[in-house]
Amino acid sequence: MNVVFHVSSADLGDWRHAIRNVRNLLDDETVETDTVTLLANGDAALLFLDGSPVRDRLDSLFEAGVRCCACRNSLDGRGFDAERLADGVEVVPSGVGELVTRQAAGDAYLKVP
Amino acid sequence: MNVVFHVSSADLGDWRHAIRNVRNLLDDETVETDTVTLLANGDAALLFLDGSPVRDRLDSLFEAGVRCCACRNSLDGRGFDAERLADGVEVVPSGVGELVTRQAAGDAYLKVP
Amino acid sequence: MNVVFHVSSADLGDWRHAIRNVRNLLDDETVETDTVTLLANGDAALLFLDGSPVRDRLDSLFEAGVRCCACRNSLDGRGFDAERLADGVEVVPSGVGELVTRQAAGDAYLKVP
C-alpha cells in the first residue's frame, strides 16, 4: 500500500506531529507500506525550504525512503523559487493535483493537520 | 477522476485557501478531472449563504463547473434555512453522508482545511 | 460501506463537531453504512481517557455500534497507559497504521478536524 500524507499548516507543532505520524507509520510492524509521500501545500510548503526549522528532521525521512513534495503554486504565490527547497525535496506543479493523482493510483490519504 | 474538497472551517483565510486549491486543481494540466465538488459542513456551511464574504469568488467556481454543496444539518443547527444559500449552491442532507457517497463512487477526497 | 473518521485535535469544540458528524452520518437515511469507526491520534487520543469531558457522549456512540479507537503511540508519548481509556475504547498500535489498514480495506476516510 502506498500512502500520501497531506500537510497544509505551517505551525511548527503541527509539522512535528506530521513528521511523527510518518515515523509512526514506518515503525508500525502491523502495516506494510510501499512508497510513503509527505506532501506540503499552502503555507506548509515553506517548511520544505532550505533553512527550515524542521530541516534536520527531514534527513531521517529521506533515509527511510520517504518522498517529500512541495507545491509549486504555493511557493510561487509566496514569492519563493523551487531552487530554494531543501536538497531532496521534489516540487510538483500543484499539491492538490499530486494528491488526486496519488489517490487515482490507489494511495491511502491522511490529512495531518 | 472526480474530486471532492471538504472544508469545515469558517475562517476566511482557510476559505480563500480552499477556493485557491480548487482553482489550482482546475489549472493543473497534468491532472485530468471530471466533476469537482466543494462541500462545506460545520461552520463552513455559513460561507455558502447569500451575502457571504466569499460570494464573488463562488461565481468563478460555478463558471468552471464546480459543484458547491452545503450540509443541511449544519445550516439547521445554526438556525439558517437552505433558501438563504447563494444561488447555485446545492444543499445535501448531511455533509458527511455526501462525502461517503462520493468516495463510494470513487471520488478522490481532499480536506482543506 | 465502512467509514473511518479521523480526529487529531483535542479542542472540545472540534470533538463535539466530530461526534455530531458521526451522528449525522448514522442518521442520514440516504446513505447506507456498515462499520463506522472514530479514530483519535495526537492530543485527540486523550479525549478517549476515562474522565474525559466528552465521556458521556461516547456511550451513545457505543450504543449505535460505533467503534472508538485510540492510538497507542499518542498515549505513550503523553505518559498515559491504555488501561486508563474509557470502557469500550479500543487501542491500536498506531493511529496512522489503522487509518491505512482501513483505507486498504476500502473504508471511506473523513478528517474532522
Image: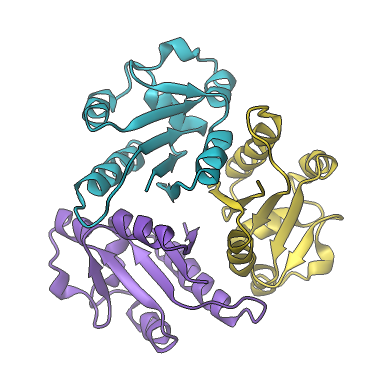
Chain colours: A cyan, B yellow, C purple
Q: Quick check: A101 above or below A58?
A: below
User: What's the residue at 32%, 60% (across, down)?
Assistant: C98
> Which quadrant holds residue A54?
top left
* Residue positioned 37% across, 84% down in the render: C62
Q: Residue at x 43, y 34 (%)?
A: A39
**Residue A37 drawn at (x, y percent):** 38, 36
Q: Is residue B31 left or right of residue A104?
A: right
Q: Indicate left or right for C88 with C26 as reference.
A: left
Q: Could you tell me residue A103's position as x and y percent? A: 52, 45
Q: Is residue A80 left or right of residue C71?
A: right
Q: Nearer the viewer, residue C48 or A31?
A: A31
- Of the pair C95 and B17, the residue shown nearer to us: C95
Quadrant in which residue A40 is drawn:
top left
User: How many numbered discs sit on the rendered protein?
Assistant: 0
Residue A28 shown left or right of residue C30 in the figure: left
**Picture coordinates of residue B26, whole percent (x, y):** 70, 35
Q: In the displayed structure, would residue C55 be above or below residue B88?
A: below
- Residue placed most toward the observer, C34 or C51: C34
Answer whether residue B44 is visible to the viewer in this image. Answer: yes
Residue A12 picture location, percent across and down? 33, 36
Image point 59% across, 22% down: which residue?
A77
